[in-house]
Image (cartoon, rainbow, N blue to C red):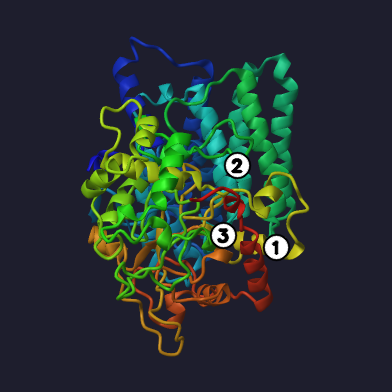
Amino acid sequence: MACHIFKNSLRKSTIIAFLTVFITCCGFLIKIRTDTGAQVDKYYAEKLLTLKKRLFALKENCDKKQALGVLKIDFLQARLAYKQLAVLTEYYDINVSRLLNGPNIVRVEEDNPDKHIAPHGFQVIEDYLFGKWENKFYKLIVAEVAEMIDALAQLENQPGRENIFRDDLVWDAIRSASVRLATLGITGYDSPVALLSLRESFATIRGMKDLLSIFKRKMGNGNATLYANTISSLDKAAAYLKRNNNFNDFDRLVFIVKYMNPFYKSLNELRVAAGIHIPEGRYPVNFNAPSIFSDTAFNINFFSPGGDYTVTKERIDLGRKLFYDSLLSGTKNRSCASCHKPELAFTDGLKTALSIDHQKFLLRNTPTILNSGLQSRQFFDSRADILENQLEEVVHNSDEMKGSFVQTVQDLKNDSSYSPLFRKAYAAEKEPLSGFNIANAISSYIRSLTTLNSRFDQYMRGDTLKLTRREKNGFNLFMGKAKCATCHHLPLFNGLLPPDFSETESEVLGVPQSNDRHNAKLDPDEGRFLFTNSSIHKYSFKTPTLRNIGLTAPYMHNGVYTTLEEVMEFYNKGGGRGLGIAPSSQTLPFDNLNLSKKEIVNIISFMLSLTDTTYLAVPHN
């Protein structure tokens, strides 16, 4: 099928790498370096040097076998230096950034799952210093620091580096850093053991402010007030962090709504006023949205095949009709809507899906399709990249639809109501009624089912009466002590990783086969491993959205839990590790969250505030 050849757009890091090589080869003919670019490059070099000095200090004190307290201070100073630099490095070179500060878990590249990549950087060292100390860690830290210094050398010696700091890209790096700060930086994502996130966030803000100061001369007198307000919003955010530096007590809701959202809006307004264009290319975010919590924050077409297959009203209308038509199934008695019921938030309410012949239950739970267009991987095992490819697999699956697009094309041609709809939706094509266009039309309808208007969303957009005190407390626990947001990332609450929003994460949780805590057994479904054959993906499943979670029971990939209380208890006890069934590759970074019953109630109350049923007001068949 044609849908196999479509891929998401090139990631930003790939584009920047190409730009670097191109400029290196052609820089003598096309000179694009600006005064601000030269100043940013100088700043970048200074911060690289500072970080290197901090790392050498840590290495030297490890060689001298200094006391643990001394090493922790060295570590913190190096981390703070890195966070200032990371405003640029995590935008321009994500691969080197992972060598400096990647999660302490083994990973693989998407296109080479057989090659396991060991973790490196600060989070590895953090586990040594802030876990149970052993003298052998002196030597291991020295080796780790040496790896990091080698990684820094790659950044120092990057060809054509001084020419990549274009105004639009540096500006976007600042915007990107603000998103990362609000969604990951304050959650413990980068500091899961030491919980140094708030001090590191302060350093990030300093780095953002330093870079903005380089642009001051470009603002002109007419934009002086707007520039001052933008800097002031950063200063206020930094002051709030300084006053409220307890990780568990920090009010993340206030920090985001009162400080980070206004900064994001002001930063965008300043960019427009300064005449700085947005970077060229296709991006998942809408750069003109006032915040990442806006209902216009995401570009749904980024997650589509692109080109001639963008979402249009005609394709949505056609896709809706197809979604409810049983012609797609081989038995002509099952439609997409048979398992994705609107009244159940487009789930089926069953533990696992029922086969088309109603003779058996399938392996996995039926997930909601609400907001499923806002992710870069499909299926629980992440084996499909776009909805069109997922549709093809489902239709041809003998247990699910038992259909054939070849046959469906013929059936639809015999139905006089469909041909004019396909001609209208795909007017530029010689053969508008095709298997791929069937999949694209249904996918367009699914992409239209984006629901980002819950009470939580309305609160984040300024209506501060929409959340109760309990829900606010639950959000702060969700973002902090409970570590929920380190996997269910804001603002979509799925595995789409900020700030690029192009990579969908999966996790190994150690989910049990049944809800029997006394005789727990690991669910035998090996998840993503069945697709990649990579051992670290055994029992790995895509992180689903928590939006409309109150409507989509039962929960987990196998529907093992019927209530959110059961789900929270599973996490509170450390997932599979708490049940004694964890696979060696479990990715939950904790053994016990130590959440009280009251705290669990608050978190669940917050998650229920993510319910958005506005989709029910739209005709569905």
In depth, the one of 62 and 482 nearer the eye is 482
In depth, the one of 561 and 141 nearer the eye is 561
Mark 2 vs 3, N-terminal side: 2
The answer to whether 429 is drawn above or below residue 300 in the figure is: above
Q: Mark 3 points at which residue?
A: 548
As drawn, is 620 to the left or to the right of 306? right
Residue type at mark 3: give it. Asn
Position of residue 202 measured from the top left corner of the image (x, y, whole percent)? 63, 46
Position of residue 79 measured from the top left corner of the image (x, y, whole percent)? 52, 50
Dot in front, 3 or 1: 3
Tags 3 and 1 touching, CB below 8 Å: no
Which residue is depicted at the point 73% across and 57% down?
467
As drawn, is 70 to the left or to the right of 267? left
- Dot 2: what SS? loop
Tags 2 and 3 touching, CB below 8 Å: no
Q: Name the residue under label 2.
A: 295
Which residue is depicted at the point 74% across and 41% down?
236
Position of residue 191 measured from the top left corner of the image (x, y, whole percent)? 52, 58
In depth, the one of 255 and 616 nearer the eye is 616
Mark 1 vs 2, N-terminal side: 2
